[in-house]
Image (tube, coloured by chain):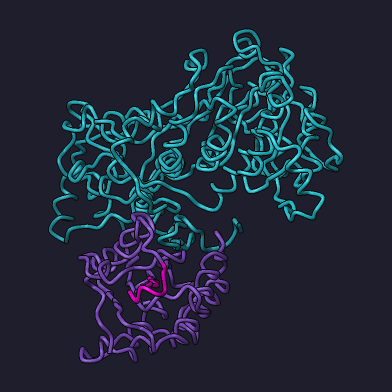
Chain colours: A cyan, B purple
Amino acid sequence: MNGNAPFQRDCVVDKPGIVGARWWHTALAHEDAKIARRTAIRTILLAGTAIAGVGAVTVAVVKASEPSFTDARKNSLDMQRDYGWNFGAVGEPLVFDGTKEMPFDPKTLPDLAIDLAPAQAKLRPYYQPTLFQSLNALPTSIGKLPTEETAGFQPLASILKPLATPLTARAYACGQSFASLFEGLRDAGGSAMDANAAVVVDLSGPEAVAFAAGACRVFDPVFLFDNWPHPRGIVHSQDALAAAAYYQPLLRNVPPRTTPAPVMFVLDRRRLMPYSDDATQFDNRYVAKLPTASNVASQLQIKHVLYVVPARSNADRELDDLNEDFVAYAAAGIDVKILSMDMFGVTVPNLNANSKDAGAKDAGRNEEDALVGASGYFWYGGQPESHDSFFLDYPWAKPPRKATMRISSNPGLSYVPAPRATLFSSGNRSPAHPRPANFATVPIVLAAGTGAILGAKFSRSGSWNRVAGGTGG
Amino acid sequence: MKHSVFAVEICMRFDPNTRLFATLRALLAAHPMGENLQQKWEWYRRVAGELLSASSAFERGCWDYYDDEAQAQGAYRDYASTVVTEDGARKAPSGDDPYRNEPRYMTFTMAFLLVNEAPTDRAIRQICNVPESRYWLRDTFRQFLSSIASGILNFANVKSDVAYMIPRDAGWGLTQQDLMQPNFHYLRPLV
């Protein structure tokens, strides 16, 4: 970006269905600002509002001289719960980054929040089913809005389709391979709980769901998706929701376990996406809500936390909203390490009857091998020989089998939580959980006389925007 | 300051394997957040040049030029609003099976909010002064694109511009049914 360039991009769209942007010549725009600064700013923010015609403009200008509304901000999720998931943008499309056309029974969707709940009662207090509850939520106050703000409202479930992409398929396979490592502990006569580990998966929403689905035979997933999708949402949580719909049949049919399963907290890595523009973006960001250090140590009896990130380049630090939690974990004696998903790679063994691999596979075949096979032969370290070195790198349990190869570089092993000052962390050792100003809020318009909510400030159909559009110059 | 608007939108068959699509997509992806006048000028010259090379495939189109303030502002808002509302873009894939024999379409749109009576505005007004009988000819659109490719736009006189392409990805092309929707009625068949 060139901050001194005369033309500055103020609006961009980059989705499968459309790509493009709008730019403003800042010097020329500034000339207008000298004339009518407030009007010019509102026009830029609200450009895109089609005006009905010259007559409408005239009326609007007259109205503008007697302001009948005021501005305010409210919590985004509260507004969606009260006035609909697409508050202020009814009728605007919700774009999914890929879909899967497949036999799909939408009648099961209302059960999504139940089907994806953790199996163990002790984990349920940590479960955040917010995203899954958006599907059939009935807005409690939608009838109070002007009709042009609500016409055409449809429940989210009616437009949702399952999503599967090559990236989710890979994440699913990595989840299976990862689970096989803990299944190996059981094969060796122990238990997947022997490592005393909790896993925190922090991948892009759909991939996080897929990874958890791949691992759900061994782990008990606890989803922490605490927002709703929105047509202008900065967090595209509709993709995570659609992936959850895709994997719902698998997650609801996990065979009953005879022993406790280790916990896997599942986060959407896009939850803190940069936000800049009230006019074009809906701030549906949120922060992760992990158990406190004392709960992790005493209630869940966890000694190790493994933080799963997409790539080695992400393996040097946690996302900002996790910093204080991880620092507190470390202070409580809980070992926190990072594992990047790209530590898993494919090597298909030679299963030819005459090969040495074939004999080895047949002789040693167990649940661990079965899961690796089901994954399409994803291995920790990318090789069969390195797979069982996992518990050498993360020495939290006795390796179930001997590894003949070690991974040369795994930056996540040297990770140690350290206090950092960010928008979401204080940089001190005592958790303060700071938040940026106006985080996860939406600008709204109130009737000046009654204080009644009229709608979202950015709404295209709102009469308050027709005023701004008509007076721009 | 008063304004004029000049906008061109072109609709043609969509084939994600063509040079046209790949180049336009790459140009849009590489368009930086901040640009100087020369970079802007060069970018649109390249875009227009690529479109010109495929002009025989233009099937539908629309262009506008208004030098009336209210019409100019309204028309520019209308074109520019698409990058916010995504109006016209599909919300789900249309599929890209080449064997189904159902054509897919793409659109490319560019619009410019000009400083009224500046040299660029006067030059654009001149090329837009075409008889009504020639409004919807491919040759007319070629004339516009040739003018842009030859550098008619001096971005010192351009207050805002918007450029977008529908779709971005293979499998998301517009169907004939999409083009029948009211939000595409303004696209006229070109001959």
**Residue A267: percent from the left, percent from the top?**
54, 32
**Which residues lie in the magenta part?**
B96-111
Quarter of the image for residue B85 reads bottom left
Left or right: residue A158 compared with residue B31: left
Residue B110 in magenta? yes
Quarter of the figure with the C terminus of chain A: bottom left
The residue furthest front is A353
Q: Residue at x 17, y 28 (%)?
A: A449
The reply to whether residue B143 is in sight is yes
Left or right: residue A185 compared with residue A217: right
Front residue of this view, candidates A290 and B47: A290
Q: Residue at x 34, y 68 (%)?
A: B174
Front residue of this view, candidates A70 and B23: B23
Q: Residue at x 42, y 79 (%)?
A: B120
The reply to whether residue B162 is in sight is no
Residue B98 in magenta? yes
**Residue A177: percent from the left, percent from the top?**
66, 39
Front residue of this view, candidates A213 and B73: A213
**Residue B93: percent from the left, percent from the top?**
38, 59
Quarter of the figure with the N terminus of chain A: bottom right
Residue A183 vertical position relative to residue B79 in the rendered view, above or below: above
Residue A204 vertical position relative to residue B133 in the rendered view, above or below: above
The number of callouts visible is: 0
Residue B60 vertical position relative to residue A78 in the rendered view, above or below: below
Quarter of the image for residue A320 reads top right
Q: Residue at x 42, y 65 (%)?
A: B171
**Residue A315: percent from the left, percent from the top?**
72, 38
Front residue of this view, candidates B102 and B43: B102
